[in-house]
Image (cartoon, rainbow, N blue to C red):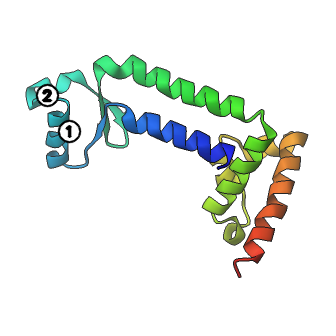
Amino acid sequence: MNKYKELKNKIEKEINNFPMFFAFNPRQFTKGLEKFRLTRKDTSQLLKIGGGGFIKKSDSIAFEKMLESHNTLRQDSLKDDEYVYSAMLYELFNHEYCYTGCPVAAFEAIGLSLEEVKADERLLRIFNETRIKYFEEMDGEF
């Protein structure tokens, strides 16, 4: 498995194991409260995290630390050429680069901007290597 996918899986597992729930209607909200062993009277103990998500206020520091840890892991990983290569290749496929011809969404998915890649010789070199590999693999698809 590639380094990028390994990190994505690790982060996904930690997020999935964090005590939270998502609710997009009253029934789902009630089920989420039940999961936390709370009632409608206890909603002051909840914190909205966006996207329909809720955590207990008492878990907010742990949640913030987890997200900060994930951000640090991602940023540190960007120093590793193999990681960057695997990340770019994965996200080029994930964002259908062959149709769009634009790598911006792929870069953003790994925490980079087009400007950052253009300004950094190492990132630009890795991107060019990745594009070659991407089109080699795409050639076998048609």
Relative to 135, is 50 above or below?
above
Q: Residue at x 70, y 29 (%)?
A: 76
Residue 32's label in the rendered image is 1
Is 97 left or right of 36, judged from the image as shown?
right
Q: Amino acid at mark 2?
A: Leu
Find residue 99 and report its image quarter: bottom right
Q: Quote the CA–CA distance across marks 1 and 2.
A: 9 Å
Q: Residue at x 79, y 69 (%)?
A: 135
- Where residue 90 appears, as percent x and y from the top left, is 66, 55
Residue placed most toward the observer, 131 or 7: 7
Q: Position of residue 69 (x, y in %)?
A: 55, 24
Which numbered disc covers residue 38? 2
Residue 48 drawn at (x, y percent): 31, 32
Which kind of residue does numbered mark 1 sit on?
A: Gly
* Left or right: 114 in relation to 65: right
Label 1 Cα crowd, 10 Å radius (few <14 / some 14-19 / many 20+) = many
Counting every numbered tag in the picture gives 2
**Residue at the (53%, 38%) spot, across then down:** 10
